[in-house]
Image: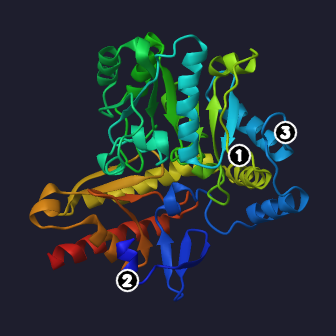
């Protein structure tokens, strides 16, 4: 807030495809899909038209109790048909953080209904980002998002992102009879684009099954073609108990998220009387949001962006890899999904006092938007990006690094 108060704001005036224009009319490549969500690109008239038609038919109405609407039903059925979850059910929400809270509460409530109310402990991973609602803030794997808010939700812990053995050790330390669920992103996104080791998710799924711990996948960033499939986790051949989704489900055109829940977890609530899940939000199942999402999914399928994304992934990887030779760069992480990270060296960050915010500013001045985190610059462009635009992104980042290096 203080930074904005002391300087001019960057006003985004309009957008089309992979491009943004500011209030002065200058053009920028959206190298981050805003916040990881503009999967089909900006300015798609078919999504706007679908939302408009729905608003003119049924603007909004609650889906509490036995109330529903056709767009919400059709979207839920479509998502369930593609989810790698056994006998899936869908809970719709308004976004990713809300969906994480829904999944966490459902996990705890599930064990309570089964007569094991002591199973409340939630485990997550270092670097994991799960939104900034109550449960999300409490299980996030980055300390900077957790501090300064007083006591958070208790019975949570964090394990190394790359070790199934560490997860098992933590379950045993806490006691399997007290652990409710384990949360993991297919690829850690906002935490720095960290890829899972070979075989990691197979081992994790086995550990969770061994101790009866619910396996919850956070696919908010990784879903809807960003990793070449519907929910990202399909690349690793496992079937979680729940999948949290948002962002790419509507490509950000409308605020929407949700949780895909396995039939096993749903059964005590769905099949038995007297076990209500007392949870919900005002705009969950909003018909205009669902209609926009359906139009977005139509684009993903019609243009086969699931296949296209695998080609984009390879080209983005090949374009970013040479940056590893830059004297300011310690590591490039890419090659799984349309995303990547360019991490600065310890010497640059500490001895030379360089910040990722400086590199971000230099890139933006040259017409490319990146995402700075404390140690790296992140990229996650729309899946519709061209090879030429990828090369422009990479060369601009290289030029920004050169400019910062020269200044220091």
- Eyeballing the image, is 299 above or below 9? above
> Disc 1 designates what residue?
284
Q: Confirm whether residue 43 shows in the render.
A: yes
The Cα–Cα distance between marks 1 and 2, rounded to whole angstroms, is 37 Å
Question: Which residue, given by chain and number where applicable, does mark 3 sit on?
Answer: 67
Who is closer to the viewer here, 394 or 77? Answer: 77
**Looking at the picture, how far across and down is residue 228, in whole percent?**
56, 43
Mark 3 or mark 1: which comes first in sequence?
A: 3
Which circle marks residue 357 in the picture? none
Height in image: 46 above or below 174?
below
- Of labels 1 and 2, earlier in sequence is 2
Q: Is residue 406 left or right of residue 93?
A: left
Gap between marks 3 and 2 measured at Cα:
48 Å
Residue 319 percent across, percent down from the top left = 38, 60
The quadrant the C terminus occupies is bottom left
Q: Which residue is mark 2?
A: 7
């Amino acid at each position: 807030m203080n930074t904005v108060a002391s300087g001019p704001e960057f006003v985004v005036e309009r957008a089309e495809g992979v491009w943004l224009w500011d209030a002065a009319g200058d053009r920028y490549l959206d190298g981050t899909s805003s916040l990881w969500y503009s999967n089909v690109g900006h300015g798609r008239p078919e999504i706007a038209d679908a939302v408009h038609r729905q608003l003119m038919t049924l603007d909004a109405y609650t889906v509490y109790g036995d109330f529903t609407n056709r767009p919400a039903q059709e979207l839920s059925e479509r998502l369930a048909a593609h989810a790698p979850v056994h006998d899936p059910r869908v809970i719709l929400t308004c976004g990713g953080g809300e969906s994480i809270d829904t999944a966490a509460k459902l996990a705890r409530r599930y064990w309570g209904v089964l007569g094991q109310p002591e199973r409340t402990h939630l485990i997550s991973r270092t670097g994991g980002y799960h939104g900034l609602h109550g449960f999300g803030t409490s299980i996030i794997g980055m300390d900077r998002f957790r501090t300064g808010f007083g006591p958070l939700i208790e019975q949570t812990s964090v394990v190394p992102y790359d070790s199934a053995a560490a997860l098992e050790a933590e379950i045993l330390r806490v006691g399997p009879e007290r652990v409710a669920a384990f949360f993991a992103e297919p690829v850690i996104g906002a935490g720095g684009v960290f890829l899972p080791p070979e075989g990691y998710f197979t081992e994790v799924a086995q550990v969770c099954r061994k101790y009866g711990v619910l396996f919850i996948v956070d696919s908010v960033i990784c879903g809807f073609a960003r990793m070449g499939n519907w929910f990202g986790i399909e690349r690793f051949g496992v079937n979680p108990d729940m999948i949290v989704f948002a962002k790419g489900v509507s490509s950000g055109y409308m605020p929407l998220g949700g949780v895909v829940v396995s039939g096993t977890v749903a059964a005590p609530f769905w099949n038995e009387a007297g076990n209500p899940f007392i949870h919900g939000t005002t705009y969950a199942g909003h018909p205009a949001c669902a209609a926009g999402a359906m139009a977005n999914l139509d684009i993903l399928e019609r243009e086969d962006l699931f296949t296209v994304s695998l080609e984009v992934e390879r080209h983005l990887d090949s374009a970013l890899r040479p940056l590893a030779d830059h004297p300011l760069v310690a590591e490039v992480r890419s090659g799984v999904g349309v995303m990547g990270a360019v991490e600065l060296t310890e010497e640059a960050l500490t001895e030379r006092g360089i910040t990722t915010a400086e590199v971000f500013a230099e890139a933006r001045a040259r017409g490319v938007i990146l995402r700075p985190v404390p140690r790296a610059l992140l990229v996650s462009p729309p899946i519709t990006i061209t090879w030429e635009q990828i090369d422009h992104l990479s060369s601009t980042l290289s030029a920004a690094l050169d400019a910062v290096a020269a200044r220091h």
